[in-house]
Amino acid sequence: MLQERVKNLLEEAFDENNSLFLISLKISDKNHILIVLDGDSGVSVNDCISVSRKIEHNLDREEEDFSLEVASAGVSEPLKLPRQYKKNIGRRLEVQTNSNKFEGELVAVDEEGIKLTWTAREPKPVGKGKVTVEKEATLAFQEIVKAKVVITF
């Protein structure tokens, strides 16, 4: 019952600001509501406040007591939705599949998956020494076990 009402209010909030989208909604046994958001161009504190107000002002504490927390997806959090990948084009990702681990620049995203590129040092085909080569991998979303943005300073 509470979950349904919160979902409906979130849909209204996303209609008002369609750059925002839901990453997760958890409601504990004690009615602690935890909402994690992301946005096509990030999530501001004001975005969190407006979503929080939308929920809080439309639920009645007399009817059902609750606590509410609205947060943005942290930069260290794994990417979960295709929409999150799109906003990270041009950034470096670390991607784990069932069989391999890749690290490269995210250069493309479509309905099926992602494309990463990177440079690697490999032995020369002929002779001694190494040569720098451009590598790329196209990964389907269903292959990806975990993907995170690599933070560089």
Image: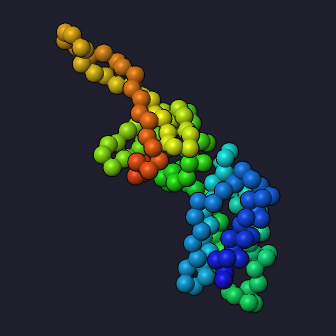
Between 112 and 43, the residue placed more toward the observer is 112
Residue 87 at x, y percent in the picture:
61, 42
Give the residue displayed 48% in from the left and 52% down from the top.
Answer: 78
Residue 2 at x, y percent in the picture:
66, 81
| Residue closest to the far bottom | 62
Q: Where 21 falls versus 138 (above or below)?
A: below
Give the residue displayed 70% in from the left and 61% down from the top.
Answer: 48
Residue 69 at x, y percent in the picture:
64, 70
Residue 45 visible within the image: yes
| Rendering quarter of residue 12 | bottom right
Residue 49 visible within the image: no
Colour style of the rendered protein structure: rainbow
Q: Is 4 placed left or right of 129 in the picture?
A: right
| Residue closest to the far front | 112
Give the residue displayed 30% in from the left and 15% down from the top.
Answer: 131
Q: Where 43 falls versus 89 (above or below)?
A: below
Residue 27 at x, y percent in the picture:
58, 76
Badge count: 0
Locate the N terminus and report the quarter of the image it occupies. bottom right
| Rendering quarter of residue 118 | top left
| Residue closest to the far left | 128
Give the residue displayed 65% in from the left and 66% down from the top.
Answer: 70
Q: Where 31 falls versus 123 (above or below)?
A: below
